[in-house]
Image: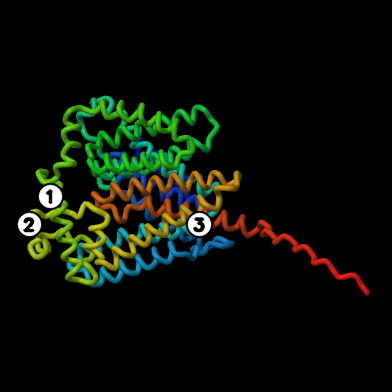
């Protein structure tokens, strides 16, 4: 039944894609982020839904009239430079076969991320994109939160198998990034039942993130919560909510969870933590030795034998920063950090320009909540290999579209004219 449902939704939406390519973008985001086909048990698990949607979207975009160019600014130029550099490093990859497999996957993500940036333009499109992200990940938040309640937190929450968020740490970070987006939508709706549903989903998603037993997720949710409180308009009320909810969620978790979280301060005695640090050393020394890094998928025994302090402890980087460093070298890391800088600056520009205009209050709130998502990603991503996770790129697309709307509005407003200078008194005629 699930296979049939996903198939009907996808094939039923194909005609709508050719009428409006944005539908294709939203459908792609739904398939790539939620991976609904993985929830079935039959043919849908292996059917190329994403490929079909991408082809239809590209064809529809090619035949669409009107503007559809990529915005030209620091964010997009840096993203293009990062994509070009990843192609260059793939040419010099140490393990070409494995690198090509990952390159093929990453380039598809980057292509559709660029398409998203080209097609998402209106406020309605932006809100639809945010809703698709919230529904796609909120499904796992509700599911994982209920699972944590039912098991008393004794068992771990996992994401859909075979996806970016299949790992317990990854699904936790994805849910943490979604909570600020849920809060934004809660602020934008007047429907009390929808507001209640979003509030419950936020709590269940936070509980699911804790139920993943991810120590990085705990740090990420703490950083995100502090940022949301700092940027809130009513710090007393938001602070009171945090003070009331946080202890309840933490007290609900069992002793096994608390014991695992306590190891954050004792990482020297934790094999998993030391394995990650060993992988970070390997990535650093590899990048020092090779300008182009090692290319995709460098967690190989041969490289650990040459570059790691402990050659026998082979681990993936488990860090967005060291992952990009090991795979694409210091140039790749610089471009990735620069991409984050321009994304943050874009959001800051939106909040600054929209602050004094009530009709643009939604834009300021959206930019602030996306910044909160990126705070969670920056902290939690320090312990996860999620450089190519597509959600941050979709959020960047939402920021680009929001900035373009504000710029268009500002360009139509009359510029303030200088006050006319008072004429100097004239001398009386003789």
Provide residue 308's location: percent of width, then percent of height: 11, 60
Q: Residues within 10 Å of mark 3 (few under 14, many from 20)?
A: many
Q: Residue at x 18, y 41 (%)?
A: 264
Provide residue 44's location: percent of width, then percent of height: 33, 44
Quarter of the view holding residue 81 = bottom left
Give the number of the mark in front: 3 or 2: 2
The answer to whether residue 304 is left or right of residue 408 is left
Q: What whole-number distance in Å separates the C-alpha atoms at marks 3 and 2?
A: 48 Å
Provide residue 290's location: percent of width, then percent of height: 19, 71
Q: Tell which circle, 3 or 2, labels the residue nearer the N-terminal end.
A: 3
Above or below, 155 against 90 in this view is above
Q: Which residue bears the numbered disc 2?
A: 310
Quarter of the view holding residue 415 = bottom right
Q: Which residue bears the numbered disc 1?
A: 274
Quarter of the view holding residue 165 = top left
Q: Residues within 10 Å of mark 1 (few under 14, many from 20)?
A: some
Q: Tell which circle, 3 or 1, labels the residue nearer the N-terminal end.
A: 3
Task: Say which mark, if any, is on residue 148.
Answer: none
Q: Which residue bears the numbered disc 3?
A: 119
SS category of the residue bearing label 2: loop
Q: Residue at x 37, y 31 (%)?
A: 242
Instruction: Look at the image and tell me whether residue 21 can be seen.
Output: no
Front residue of 340/40: it is: 340
SS category of the residue bearing label 3: helix
Number of numbered labels in the structure image:
3
Instruction: Look at the image and tell me whether residue 231 can be seen.
Output: yes
Contact check, label 2 and label 1, Cβ < 8 Å: yes
Q: Quadrant of the C terminus?
A: bottom right
Q: Residue at x 33, y 35 (%)?
A: 206
Q: What whole-number distance in Å separates the C-alpha atoms at marks 3 and 1?
A: 44 Å
Give the number of the mark in front: 3 or 1: 1
Q: Tell which circle, 2 or 1, labels the residue nearer the N-terminal end.
A: 1
């Amino acid at each position: 039944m699930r296979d049939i449902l996903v198939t009907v939704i996808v094939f039923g939406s194909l005609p709508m894609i050719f009428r409006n390519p944005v539908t294709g973008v939203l459908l792609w985001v739904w398939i790539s982020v939620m991976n609904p086909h993985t929830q079935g048990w039959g043919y849908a698990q292996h059917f190329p839904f994403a490929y079909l949607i991408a082809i239809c979207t590209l064809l529809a975009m090619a035949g669409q009239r009107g503007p559809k160019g990529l915005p030209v600014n620091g964010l997009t130029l840096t993203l293009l430079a990062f994509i070009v550099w990843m192609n260059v490093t793939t040419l010099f990859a140490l393990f070409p076969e494995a690198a090509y497999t990952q390159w093929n996957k990453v380039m598809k993500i980057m292509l559709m991320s660029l398409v998203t940036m080209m097609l998402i333009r209106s406020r309605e499109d932006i809100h639809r994109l945010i809703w698709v992200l919230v529904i796609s990940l909120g499904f796992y938040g509700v599911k994982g939160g209920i699972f944590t309640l039912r098991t008393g937190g004794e068992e771990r929450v996992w994401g859909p198998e075979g996806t970016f968020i299949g790992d317990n740490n990854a699904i936790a970070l994805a849910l943490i990034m979604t909570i600020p987006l849920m809060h934004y939508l809660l602020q934008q709706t007047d429907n009390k039942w929808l507001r209640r549903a979003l509030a419950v989903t936020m709590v269940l998603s936070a509980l699911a993130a804790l139920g993943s037993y991810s120590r990085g997720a705990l740090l990420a949710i703490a950083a995100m919560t502090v940022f949301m409180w700092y940027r809130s308009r009513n710090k007393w009320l938001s602070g009171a909510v945090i003070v009331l909810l946080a202890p309840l969620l933490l007290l609900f978790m069992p002793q096994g969870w608390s014991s695992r979280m306590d190891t954050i301060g004792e990482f020297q005695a934790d094999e998993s933590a030391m394995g990650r640090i060993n992988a970070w050393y390997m990535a650093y020394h590899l990048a020092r030795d090779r300008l182009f890094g090692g290319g995709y998928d460098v967690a190989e025994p041969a490289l650990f034998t040459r570059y790691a302090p402990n050659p026998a402890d082979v681990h993936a980087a488990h860090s967005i920063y060291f992952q990009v460093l090991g795979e694409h070298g210091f140039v790749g890391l610089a471009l990735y950090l620069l991409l984050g800088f321009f994304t943050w600056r874009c959001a800051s520009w939106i909040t600054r320009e929209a602050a004094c205009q009530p009709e643009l209050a939604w834009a300021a709130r959206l930019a602030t909540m996306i910044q909160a998502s990126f705070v969670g990603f920056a902290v939690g991503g320090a312990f996860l290999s999620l450089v190519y996770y597509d959600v941050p790129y979709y959020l960047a697309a939402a920021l680009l579209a929001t900035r373009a709307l504000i710029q268009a509005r500002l360009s139509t407003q009359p510029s303030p004219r200088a006050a006319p200078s008072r004429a100097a008194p004239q001398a009386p005629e003789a």
